[in-house]
Amino acid sequence: MNPSYTQIRARIDTAAQAAGHTVRLLAVSKTHAAAAIRDLAAQGQLAFGENRVQEALAKQHELAGLALEWHLIGPLQSNKCREAARHFDWLQSLDREKLVEPLHRFRPADAPPLNVLIQVNVDGEASKSGCAPEAVAALARAVTAFPRLRLRGLMAIPEPHPDPAHRRAAFLRMRTLHDGLRAEHPGMDTLSMGMSDDFELAIACGATMVRIGTALFGARPAPG
Ligand SMILES: *Cc1c(COP(=O)(O)O)cnc(C)c1O
């Protein structure tokens, strides 16, 4: 039993109701043990996000009996395209065209298409991964050329700026970008943004999926 889950779900539902649209919760289980995932799954949470392929595969192996939905949310290297395409239901971190054809090629033909979100570098920070906003339209078109990939929308990790107005502006830029692309790609239905510290603001700005780790599972050990 994870007592945080009910509270977080309630906060999401309240924010979603105020915003007038539904919002999915992605539970970000990176660094946490398979047992923590099993606990949440027993409470009805079936979508989980991991940022490292090998770590995710180990947990999938341990939890093989459960029908979970796995999202890869961390940076993807070319040499991991095969595993990403075979073992995940969603890739939220597509950021360059070079990965598109290999993802299609490695996606098993008998599996449903891989759901893809384009990660956008919405703040233009040099240190962060993500596609430049100006390059998103071309990348979106590249994805839709391959039938084993299904373009579902956009993802962003805005800079954790102390000024909420700054974050809000970034979320709203994402929404504008997403809405603009939907004219050409009506299948885009997912705007993934908002984490433990700012998910209510993200929902108010149009997020349809929030990715929450710390507020559900507690603090992660410092990377070392
Ligand atoms: C770790 C992570 C999250 C969750 O962050 P919290 O602040 O722990 O909720 C969300 N999205 C991505 C891409 C992450 O890597």
Image: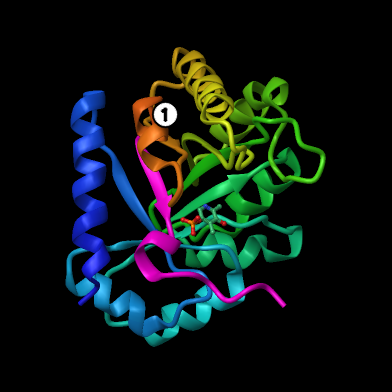
Image spot of residue 108 (x, y percent): 49, 61
Report the magenta residues as a range.
Answer: 208-224
Which kind of residue does numbered mark 1 sit on? Answer: Met
Residue drawn at (60%, 42%) of the image: 160
Does residue 4 lie above or below 124 as drawn? below
Furthest residue to the right?
Answer: 126
Whether residue 111 is visible here, answered yes or no, is yes
Does residue 44 lie above or below 170 as drawn? below
Residue drawn at (49%, 67%) of the image: 87
* Colour setup of the view: rainbow
Toward the viewer: 106 or 52? Answer: 52
Q: Residue 80: name its quadrant.
A: bottom right
Residue drawn at (50%, 40%) of the image: 147
Image spot of residue 223 (x, y percent): 67, 73
Does residue 204 lie above or below 208 as drawn? above
Few, some or many residues within 10 Å of mark 1 (<14, 14–19, 20+) = many
Image spot of residue 128 (x, y percent): 74, 45
Q: Callout 1: helix, strand or loop?
A: loop
Toward the viewer: 158 or 164? Answer: 164
**On the rendered image, what quadrant is the C terminus found in?**
bottom right
* Residue 175 falls inside the magenta stretch: no
Q: Which residue is mark 1?
A: 188
**Does the residue tagged 1 have its C-beta within 8 Å of any atom of ligand 1?**
no
Toward the viewer: 115 or 154? Answer: 154
Q: Residue 122: name its quadrant.
A: top right
* Residue 218 falls inside the magenta stretch: yes
Whether residue 63 is visible here, answered yes or no, is no
